[in-house]
């Protein structure tokens, strides 16, 4: 094989493959079970107490490790019951079980989680009713 047309100095690194078990995540169930996955537990180390806030729409959760905690995860399993958080998210239209992908914000020394889940659709009663199409118009 001839590699004469390949300029090796222009080659670019490709980021390593990210496995699901390497993705830092928090999940929140309908019953208020909040769980750190194994990857997040490993990154957080022994830190299991956080003060949590959410964005107004519930899409982001922010975990402050140095503030007075409002949640304490179990040391081994990394879970906690926090029904108020589940209610808070549901009130904002977040479908539960919600999964937040976590990232460390070095500048603020906090963990930030983003939920990519779709919000609940609007209630049918709130939708504007359109005119019904007659059979003749449909067949035209």
Image (cartoon, helix red, strand yellow):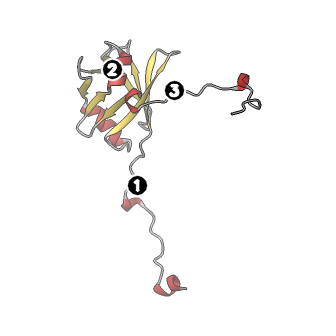
Which of the labelled discs sits on residue 122, or is there none? 1
Q: Secondary structure at mark 3?
A: loop
* Residue at the extreme right of the image, as rendered: 5
Along the viewing direction, whichever of 75 and 72 lies nearer the viewer = 75
Q: How many marks?
A: 3
What is the spatial separation of the Cα atoms under label 2 and label 1, in whole angstroms? 36 Å
What is the spatial separation of the Cα atoms under label 1 and label 3, in whole angstroms? 40 Å
Label 1 Cα neighbours within 10 Å, binned few <14 / some 14-19 / many ≥20: few
**Residue 117: % across, % down:** 41, 42
Task: Point out the frontmost of discs 3 and 2.
Answer: 3
N-terminal-most mark, 3 or 2: 3
Task: Point out the frontmost of discs 2 and 1.
Answer: 2
Kindly identify the residue that appears in the image at 51 percent across and 15 percent down.
Answer: 106
* Residue at the extreme bottom of the image, as rendered: 136
Along the viewing direction, whichever of 118 and 1 lies nearer the viewer = 1
Task: Point out the frontmost of discs 1 and 3.
Answer: 3
Does any portion of residue 20 appear in the rendered image?
yes
Does any portion of residue 24 appear in the rendered image?
no
Q: Secondary structure at mark 1?
A: loop
N-terminal-most mark, 2 or 1: 2
Q: Secondary structure at mark 2?
A: helix
Residue bearing mark 3: 16
Label 3 Cα neighbours within 10 Å, binned few <14 / some 14-19 / many ≥20: few
Kindly identify the residue that appears in the image at 53 percent across and 15 percent down.
Answer: 107
Kindly identify the residue that appears in the image at 44 percent across and 18 percent down.
Answer: 110
What is the spatial separation of the Cα atoms under label 3 and label 2, in whole angstroms? 21 Å
The answer to whether 55 appears left or right of 48 in the picture is right
The answer to whether 105 appears left or right of 33 in the picture is right
Which quadrant holds residue 132?
bottom left
Residue bearing mark 2: 41
Kindly identify the residue that appears in the image at 43 percent across and 61 percent down.
Answer: 127
Label 2 Cα neighbours within 10 Å, binned few <14 / some 14-19 / many ≥20: many
């Amino acid at each position: 094989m001839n590699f004469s047309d390949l300029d090796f100095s222009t080659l670019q690194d490709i980021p390593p493959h990210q496995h699901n078990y390497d993705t830092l995540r928090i999940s929140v169930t309908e019953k208020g079970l909040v769980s750190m996955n194994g990857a997040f537990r490993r990154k957080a180390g022994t830190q299991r107490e956080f003060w949590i806030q959410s964005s107004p729409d519930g899409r982001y959760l922010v975990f402050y490790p140095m503030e007075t905690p409002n949640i304490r995860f179990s040391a081994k399993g990394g879970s906690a019951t926090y029904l108020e958080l589940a209610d808070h998210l549901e009130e904002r239209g977040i479908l539960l079980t919600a999964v937040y992908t976590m990232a460390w914000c070095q500048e603020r020394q906090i963990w930030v989680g983003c939920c990519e889940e779709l919000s609940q659709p609007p209630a049918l009663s709130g939708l504007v009713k359109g005119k019904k199409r007659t059979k003749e118009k449909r067949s035209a």
